[in-house]
Amino acid sequence: MAYSAYDRAVIRTRKQNLALAAALVGAAATVIGPAGPATLTAIAPAQQTALTADERAQAQAQTPLSPDERQLATFVDANNTDALALLERAVNINSGSMNFDGVRQVGAMFRKEFDALGFKTEWIDGAAWNRAGHLIATHAGPGRKILLIGHLDTVFERDSPFQKFEKIDAGHAKGPGITDMKGGDVIMIHALKALKSIGALDRMNVTVVMTGDEESTGRPLARARDALVEAAKGAAVAIGFENGDGDPAHAVVARRGTTSWRLETTGVTGHSSQVFGADLGSGAIYEAARIVNAFREKLAGEPHLTFNPGVFLGGTSVEFDAAVSGGTATGKTNVVPAKTVVAGDLRALTPQQFDKAMNTMRTIVKESLPKTSATITFDEGYPPLAPTAGNEQLLVMYDRASRDLGLGAVTAVSPDKAGAADVSFVAGHVPMIIDAVGMKGRDDHSPSETADLGSLPIQTKRAAVLLLRLMSR
């Protein structure tokens, strides 16, 4: 059986994870819970989240953490209330991508946190790409450069009814952007505070980029991501604090990229009684249908590749508004249609897969039916985060940090379940990349967006220990 590069990476990572699990079992690492001793590796993520502070402390006391790492974990638990308060304040500021004032307010709030940690901070104005802008924070140090990535905006604009942080129970809260990704931003900041508390941050070389338009990226796209790409130069490691699939046992080492495409067909119009004849040919709608069906026949089923026609308009007259991905079409049942517009998306795991798919689609478009013509264009899009050995190695380190903390294994989620994100823009610039180490929960991008508050200290500890170990390498 042939495996893709991603599948091979997953298999290798799982083998390494099993070896790490065996080592922990061999060391008889146990945690004392309400039901008595339990092997650490047998604790499910939901059970891990449900552990009390005392139980987590007992687990950490029996795992192979250094004294500094134990202090990091202690700091995170002691300051979790402050982290929750910062999260609530951030969520209560509307920062929909097009609410520029709100995005800047969240940026100013986090900027104060970085200033207090000794970072040099800068706000990059986004007028050139019609967005609010980005927050950049740099901390010079002797170690190798580490890039941390977050974003300030959400999908919930000022007119959304979903506006405020709402505590559901002791372990859960709802709020716009609480998991995607203000929770991740807070995890990043409090991991850095933990490192500052033991003096480790003073020796670290860290750059933070929090973009203000991840959910609705400005144009031109290259200009909107100049600051992020520039920050990636010279970095050895990049870590994204997105929420991923919401499972605390998962992280992301590969993401599919995405772009949009637009197909336009034209035909000779006239009385429908003459359709398919020498004078009128097949018409614009049949030509569009041929092309879209050929896309399916030629490309469907290829691993990690998807393409979807989301809007299909055809008739004697068509008006299409790309900004809202919609429009109008008029025609008559007895008139051969003159025009069709089809808009869709394309997702692929590697640049090579994108190129192959686009070339196949272009070839199909050129094979026009009689008396018709067609064109296809591809928009700027998010690049893929292709799987690499470096990304896999970073996942193994993150997984080991989690196990050593007594928080269970972390494995790679399929890129088919990981949407596009800012971290993909630094692929090719940074040799080791991991994402989705932020707040976990469910129902992001909906009025039910809910955070698992127990994941806040868990994810913060994992990040802090990983960062300390990266500094020591």
Image (tube, rainbow, N blue to C red):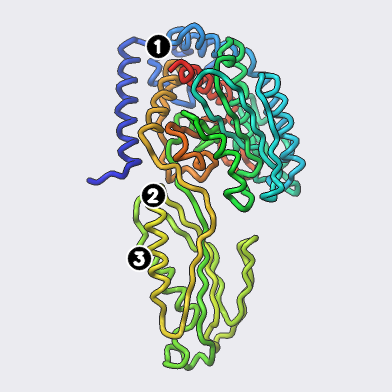
> Which amino acid type is marked by label 2?
His
**Which callout, 2 or 1, points to the residue nearer the camera?**
2
Q: Are marks 3 and 1 in contact (CB under 8 Å)?
A: no
- In this orientation, which residue lies closer to the viewer: 100 or 294? 100
- In this orientation, which residue lies closer to the viewer: 144 or 199? 144
- Label 3 sits on residue: 297
Q: Earlier in the sequence, mark 3 or mark 2?
A: 3
Q: Are marks 2 and 1 in contact (CB under 8 Å)?
A: no
Q: Is residue 129 above or below residue 410?
A: below
Q: Is residue 432 above or below residue 352?
A: above
Label 3 vs label 1: CA separation?
Answer: 54 Å
Q: Position of residue 360 (x, y in %)?
A: 37, 63
Q: Which mark is residue 304?
A: 2
Local crowd at mark 1 within 10 Å, few (<14), some, or many (≥20)?
A: many
> Which amino acid type is marked by label 3?
Glu
The local secondary structure at tag 3 comes to: helix
- Label 1 sits on residue: 30
> Which amino acid type is marked by label 1?
Thr
The local secondary structure at tag 1 comes to: strand
Label 2 vs label 1: CA separation?
Answer: 39 Å
